[in-house]
């Protein structure tokens, strides 16, 4: 019997003692059975005593009980009727235990405060940016101070990591909350110091999972070591692991991220959340393992890793990792492969020759939808039509971009000047769309995976794809299609044309560069470059401009009449002459000139020859009346000066000159409209050394001058622009400094402002 003196009885490792005692026989029983009887009697006596206390500890998990769940349950049941269970560490006490057991001393308060504030600001900045309304923004700002406090209490550990172990891992049968957390975090700290991995906090994303000691400590606490080995090999630590590949690409794109390793950080955090489930409050239900994007960003954002980078990397992980699963709400690593692994298996079976065939079909589909004046991937010059009276754009194959510069230029000149073994006639009616080499790798990759996606979808039944996997397949398809569209849009950004230099054919290379174009389609962008930006192709032609180009007029050296086919051939045959979209531009100019009285049109068969001269009756000519372009027969028609036509008068002999006999003039922008005259002015060859242009512009008209000024800047050594802004209504000097002076200074543009 217990006396009246205060008595404290401590029993530790009870289960281990009883288990060993079970092997020691005592008469018909065992020492273990007798110990159980003794413990039952002892607990009863202590319960009946007012001065005695019995404290004994039992293992919390089956693993710590050496899987002897029955004995653990029996020992727990012995005192269940009279005990008062106490957990050694509850609630937020674990933070203080971890700091006291793992750190040599308390962290400096100023360091703790600065780190907690910096991390909280990173998270709050993201929450405010994502907030849908003002109320949500105020709530995010209000939560910041509380978040700073919790981070400071947990420093140097991230409060989210402690909550993860306390609330999620605690549901695992093999995890012991305090001891397990101590063991794991001690290994993380030791390894991080050994590897010199620096971070402002130790969070779920900071565990160096690529280290063997950390992996061993992690799986010792959460279990499933062997099943997760393929996950680690393919997505984390293998030579071709997805997270490592993403980080390597990011480091090349932005060297500042090389030490941050955002892909590995986010993947590691998701792995930590892939074990244990969160208990729902008041529902008695445990959520499945995994982490939402919001929880993940709250746990990972900090100085050096912003929300934009994190969200971008998260999408890359989702698109590339083999074992990362996303159900639309939570991210989680599982031991079964996702749709990416199936796609990789199918992508291996895509033959190399299938990829260019796929890309050619995609280019043809986009170009043929808007024009029939294009040739896709001609392998030989004879595959590009000649003598077609329209401007043709030949899209060169991808292999062209991989040739040397000299080989590219030789190939291009051959395509522009030859039609098989014969010289090309319509050399001025052809351009070459040149592919960009830097886009090839991304395009080929997107094509390969889109082909693989088609095959996976066709084998849906044999793969037994779930609804979640089909959704992943659709999302991956959208990603690859987006990459394909982006790559194709940037694939052809330049056009090579033929020009003459010192009597020899040469290349004129035009590129979009950084010019903002209105068009979005592949072919439309190149045509905008040729027509609106550089003025190399004309979609319309004024009659007066046509007469000037043909040197038609009443002067002694000017022509009175020219056959329309000769004019057409000159446009399409002579490099350096104006390029027309097609011969309809010429027909429309003739029809317009006939209606305006600037020129006349007649069918060649109606013109009679007499003594080397030609006569045409007034009723046989189109002059002074509206005619449509369809009435103009370019092959069989003649254009004449109006004063040459009257009843009984002769017409000067038609000039049967070929396009070679006509001296082509370099194309210039259309002149300012002039009053129609009976004859065309004579074009002089005097060169222009300088230009002064005075413009009066509104905001909308200013935008329209950009291309013109750009063309002028290409020709001029320097352009001086003086801007006089009126009607300002008293500008704020601060606005002038921020909006005008500082942007010009940052762009290194010399300027002077007179206020």
Image (cartoon, grey):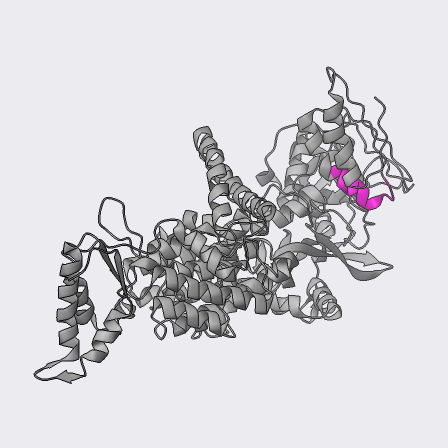
**Residue at x-position 52% and y-position 47%:** 307
Depth check, front residue: 695 or 214: 214
Depth check: give the residue in front, 298 or 702.
298
Nearer to the camera, 77 or 406: 77
| 289 part of magenta stretch | no
- In the rendered view, does 103 fall on the left or right side of 407? left
Residue 445 left/right relative to 693? left
Please tell me whether residue 709 belongs to the stretch shown in magenta.
yes
Is there any visible trace of residue 54 in the rendered image?
yes
In magenta, the rendered stretch is 708-718
Residue 339 in which image quadrant: bottom left
In the image, is residue 568 above or below residue 10? above
User: Which residue shows up at 74% across the image and 25% down it?
Assistant: 734
Q: Quadrant of the C terminus?
A: top right
Q: Is residue 368 visible?
A: no
Compared to 329, does 206 lie above or below?
Answer: below
- In the picture, measured across the screen, residue 203 lies left or right of residue 221, that is right
The foreground one among 268 and 686 is 268
Quadrant of residue 430 in the image? Answer: bottom right
> Residue 716: x, y in percent?
85, 43
Chief SS of the magenta region: helix
Q: Residue 8 placed where, x, y %?
A: 27, 59
Furthest residue toward left:
28
Q: Quadrant of the N terminus?
A: bottom left
Q: Position of residue 556 (x, y in %)?
A: 89, 39
């Amino acid at each position: 019997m217990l006396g009246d003196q205060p008595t404290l009885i401590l029993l530790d490792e009870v289960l281990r003692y009883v288990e060993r005692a079970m092997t020691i026989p005592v008469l018909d029983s065992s020492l273990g059975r007798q110990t159980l009887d003794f413990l039952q009697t002892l607990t009863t006596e202590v319960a009946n005593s007012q001065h005695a206390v019995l404290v004994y500890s039992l293992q919390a998990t089956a693993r710590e009980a050496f899987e002897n769940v029955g004995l653990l349950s029996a020992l727990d049941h012995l005192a269940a009727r009279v005990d008062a269970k106490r957990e050694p560490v509850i609630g937020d006490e674990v933070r203080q235990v971890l700091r006291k057991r793992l750190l040599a001393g308390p962290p400096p308060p100023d360091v703790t405060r600065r780190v907690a504030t910096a991390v909280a600001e990173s998270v709050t900045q993201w929450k405010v940016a994502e907030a849908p309304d003002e109320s949500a923004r105020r709530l995010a700002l209000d939560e910041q101070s509380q978040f700073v406090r919790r981070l400071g209490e947990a420093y140097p550990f991230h409060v989210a990591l402690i909550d993860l172990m306390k609330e999620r891992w605690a549901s695992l049968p093999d995890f012991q909350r305090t001891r397990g957390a101590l063991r794991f975090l001690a290994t993380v700290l030791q390894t991080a110091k050994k590897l010199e991995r620096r971070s402002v906090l130790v969070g779920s994303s900071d565990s160096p999972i690529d280290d063997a000691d950390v992996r061993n400590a992690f799986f010792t606490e959460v279990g499933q070591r062997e099943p997760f080995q393929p996950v680690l090999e393919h997505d984390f630590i293998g030579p071709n692991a997805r997270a490592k590949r993403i980080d390597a690409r990011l480091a090349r794109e932005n060297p500042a991220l090389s030490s941050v390793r955002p892909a590995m950080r986010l993947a590691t955090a998701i792995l930590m959340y892939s074990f244990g489930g969160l208990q729902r409050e008041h529902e008695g239900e445990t959520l499945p393992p995994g982490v939402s994007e919001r929880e993940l960003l709250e746990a990972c954002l900090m100085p050096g890793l912003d929300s934009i980078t994190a969200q971008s990397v998260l999408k890359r992980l989702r698109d590339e990792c083999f074992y990362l699963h996303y159900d639309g709400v939570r991210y989680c690593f599982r031991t079964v492969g996702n749709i990416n692994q199936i796609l990789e298996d199918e992508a291996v079976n895509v033959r190399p020759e299938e990829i260019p065939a796929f890309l050619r079909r995609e280019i043809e589909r986009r170009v043929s939808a808007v024009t029939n004046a294009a040739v896709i991937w001609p392998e030989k010059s004879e595959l590009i039509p000649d003598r077609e009276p329209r401007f043709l754009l030949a899209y060169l194959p991808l292999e062209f971009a991989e040739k040397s510069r000299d080989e590219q230029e030789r190939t291009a000149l051959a395509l522009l000047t030859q039609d098989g073994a014969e010289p090309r006639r319509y050399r001025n009616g052809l351009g070459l769309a040149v592919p960009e080499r830097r886009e090839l790798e991304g395009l080929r990759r997107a094509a390969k995976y889109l082909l693989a996606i088609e095959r996976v979808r066709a084998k849906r039944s044999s793969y037994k794809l779930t609804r979640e996997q089909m959704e992943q397949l659709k999302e991956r398809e959208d990603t690859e299609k987006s990459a394909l569209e982006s790559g194709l849009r940037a694939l052809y950004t330049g056009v090579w044309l033929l020009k003459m230099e010192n009597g020899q054919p040469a290349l004129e290379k035009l590129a979009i560069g950084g010019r903002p174009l209105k068009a979005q389609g592949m072919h439309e962008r190149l045509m905008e470059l040729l027509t609106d930006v550089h003025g190399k192709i004309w979609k319309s032609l004024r009659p007066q401009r046509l007469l000037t180009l043909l040197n038609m007029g009443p002067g002694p050296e000017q022509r009175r009449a020219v056959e329309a086919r000769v004019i057409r051939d000159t446009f399409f045959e002579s490099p350096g002459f104006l390029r027309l979209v097609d011969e309809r531009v010429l027909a429309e100019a003739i029809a317009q000139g006939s209606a305006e009285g600037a020129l006349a049109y007649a069918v060649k068969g109606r013109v009679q020859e007499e003594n080397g001269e030609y006569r045409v009756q007034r009723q046989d000519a189109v002059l002074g009346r509206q005619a449509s372009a369809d009435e103009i027969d370019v092959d069989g028609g003649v254009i004449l000066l109006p004063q040459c036509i009257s009843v009984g008068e002769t017409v000067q002999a038609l000039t049967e000159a070929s396009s070679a006999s006509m001296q082509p003039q370099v194309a210039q922008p259309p002149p300012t409209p002039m009053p129609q005259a009976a004859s065309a002015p004579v074009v002089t060859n005097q060169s222009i050394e300088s230009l002064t242009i005075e413009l009066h512009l509104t905001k909308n008209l200013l935008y329209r001058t950009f291309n013109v000024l750009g063309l002028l800047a290409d020709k001029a050594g320097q352009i001086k622009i003086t801007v006089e802004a009126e009607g300002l209504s008293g500008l704020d000097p601060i606005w002038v400094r921020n909006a005008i002076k500082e942007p010009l200074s940052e762009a290194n543009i010399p300027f002077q402002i007179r206020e």
